[in-house]
Each structure stands twice: as structure tokens, then as C-alpha cells.
Amino acid sequence: MTEQVHKLGEVLRAAREAKGVDLSRVERETKIRERYLSALERGEYRELPGSVYTKGFLRNYGSYLGLDPEYLIDLYRLETSVATERPRVPAPPRPIGTRGSRAFVITPGLVFAALLTVGVGAFIAYIGYELVNFARQPELRIIEPATNVNGYTGTSMILRGITAPNASVTVSNLTQNPTVTADAQGNFDITVELLPGSNVIELTARDPVTNRDSETERRTVVVVTEAAASPTPSGGTVTLEQPVADAVLTGPVPIAGSTAPSSAIQATATLVTAGSPNFSVADGGGSAVAIQPEPPVAPAALALTADAAGAFTGSLVLPPGTWDVTITPAGGEAITRRVIVQSGAGLAGTLEIAGGESYLEVEQDGTPIANVSGGIAADGESVAIAAENEVRVRAGNAGAVRLTLNGINIGVMGAAGAVVEWRITPAGG
């Protein structure tokens, strides 16, 4: 029984010695700590951080040694199930003429039966998953515009979104209601014609596989004439110097002007179009990763008070995109200026752990972040990121790791328990 329990460690140690490397070198080349490698080879699984991370270590170590990672994981499952089995109570002595029972022995046939049982269970789970998906309503998300739009001056608008692959997307509630078909990834864009005043646009998607309709998504677009789009303060009560109309900015949007002394001013921002990431993401093998940034959220209204001379100043921090910034004086008419906010150079943002802990490796321009990279990050932790050329992130529990870079919320790196590696570089870098 002892030989069977430690077979995994013997396989790993024999493969490593055949490769002619020691544990210190393996640690440098695989980024797995030496004490975890030693625990795997000795079969001391209680010294490892947990089953999810142990499987990730085995996949990484097995690939490094040229072994089949799934075979190693199967050995680990067998050994941990044997190690946790309760000891049997010895049977009382029997008469001499009674046959003794055979000792329990793990044979290749028993291993095959166990693997077959696991495979059948996985297949049944897969069929159940497919049935649930077949009965589920298709997803429909409108990405652009991310929110309702006020003060729109155009006569048409392009709506972009994501739904089920090859689904048909239909517009309703307008004078002209076009229909388009999403591409193989579920992306779509559709142009609608607008009338002056309030336009309530309704979209519904139908999945061609399940023939089910999505929930109806709505956007309200208020179209104004050119004269109404740029209101001026009545009676000269407000003079707005910043922001300049159609300004292209990197960083906070400045607010500056003059009005009656000690008057209250409110500055708000409405998203028109979300900005695009100025960086690209690839996996550990160099293949591009298709990311789906979450829509930016407008900040809370900024309250300002003019000084004794009537001047007021402030700023709004806005994510990348096109925004309508509105300055509203107390008892006066609002002034709206459209601005474009762009991301700065390099890569800057945060990495947040939410929904569970995760093993992390985080490098900025090739340098690991001290006290973070190579360790387990707890739920709720946040890591600041700043690099010029590259950010590398490897997560042992991708479903708990969220990234925001250059004001763009990328979202989670992957599924819960998945081992995922990303390499992020500036666009064109």
C-alpha cells in the first residue's frame, strides 16, 4: 500500500533526475516554489495550498518534465483518496477451518474502473450542462451606447452589442425597425434612424439553435436640434471656460468658469461612446485573447461653489470614451460640452481579488511584484499595476482575478479554478 500511495512522487522524482536538474533549478524555470515541488515528490500533500493549486502545479511540472499532466493528476486523485480512507478495524480471530478474506489490493483493473467511472460522470455532467444551455434564454448586451443618451444631435445612431452566435437581432418601437444577424462570436452592430425628441429603442435577439428570444433591451436617445444642443446661459449668468467643446484629453476633465459670487454649480457627465482599449492581451502561448470590457460608469455629480469673485474650478475623472459634460448653475440654464477622453501611455491600473483566493504571478516589465508574485492572494486584496511595455499575470483561480487597465475594466480572467496566463502589451507595441 505504501508503494502505491507514493507512486506519483516516484514518477516525478525519476523524471526530474533523468532530466538532470535539481529542485532549485525547477523552481527558477517553472516558478513553482521548491517546498511545493519537494512536497509533491515526497507525497506530503498536506504541505500544499489545496487541490486546485496542486493540480495547477502538476500540469506545469508535468509539462516541464515531458510527462502527461492528466496522468499525473489521476495518480494524485488516487493517492489522496487512499490517504484519506479510514483504517479498518481488525477482524476477530476465526476458527482454523474458516477461509480468511482477501486483502484489498489496488490493481490496474481497479484503476481503469475508477477512471471509467469518472469519465462517465463527466460525460453525464456535460450532457446536463448542454441541456441547461439549450433551455436558457440567449444573452443580449448593448455595449454602445452603454447608457441612455441625452442631447444627441444626429439623425441616426449605430448600436453595438453581443448576443448568441449567429442570432438575429431585431429593433422595434421606431418608425424604421431593421434586423441584423450577429457574427460567429455573437458581435453585432445595427444602424437606426432617429426623430427629434425622445426615441425609445428596443432590441430583441433570437438564438437560431434554441429558437428562443432574449430579454428585451432598451436605450432612450433624446435628439435635439443644433440650437438646443449647445445652450447658453440666460442673462450672462454663467461663463464656461473649461472644458472646451470637442476637446481631446488625457486625464481629468477640467471644469472652470465664472458666475455670480458664492453661487452653487453642479457638473455631471453622460457617456456617449465607450472608449476602446489601447492595449492587447495574449495568452501564455502567444495567442490573442478576445476581451470584453465592461461599460464604464459615470462618476457622481461634482458640486462646486463660486468664490467671492464668482470664479469656480474643479475636475471630473472619466474613463476613456466620448462624454457629454454638463454644467448646471443653481436656478440657471445648463451648458453641455462634448469631450473625448483618451488613455495615457503605458499600462496602469489595478488587479483585484474577488470571490475567493488565488495563486498569483504578476510581473511588470519582467520584474515580479514583491510580496505578491508567487504567493496566494486572499479575497478582497488589490494590487496596483504600472508598466511601460508589458504586464504578465498568471492566476491559479482565474475566476477570482479582475483587471482594470488604463481606465478599461477588462473583467475576470477566466473560469473559477482555471489556471490562466495573460501577457498585456500596449497596442502596436
Image (tube, rainbow, N blue to C red):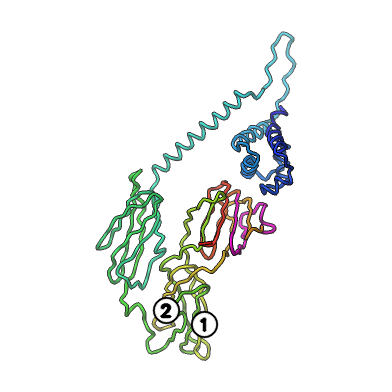
Q: Quadrant of residue 329?
A: bottom left
Q: Earlier in the sequence, mark 2 or mark 1?
A: 2
Q: Quadrant of residue 150?
A: bottom left
Badge 2 amino acid? Ala
Query: Which percent across, then down, holds residue 291?
Result: 48, 55
Vertical comparison of 280 with 2: above or below: below
Query: Which percent across, then down, holds residue 61?
Result: 65, 42
Which quarter of the rendered picture does the N terminus lie within? top right
Badge 1 amino acid? Thr
For the record, the magenta segment spans 368-395
Q: Is residue 403 left or right of residue 188?
A: right
Vertical comparison of 71 with 252: above or below: above
Examine the structure image and report whether residue 383 is included in the region drawn in magenta. Answer: yes
Q: Nearer the viewer, residue 266 or 279?
A: 279
Task: Report the residue marked by disc 2.
Answer: 245
Q: Secondary structure at mark 2?
A: loop
Query: Which percent across, then down, holds residue 145?
Result: 39, 64
Q: Secondary structure at mark 1?
A: strand
Which quarter of the rendered picture does the C terminus lie within? bottom right
> Quick one: label 1, few (<14), some, or many (20+) residues within 10 Å?
some
Q: Residue at x 73, y 45 (%)?
A: 35
Task: Report the residue marked by disc 1.
Answer: 313
Foreground mark, 2 or 1, reads: 2
Q: Which mark is residue 3?
A: none
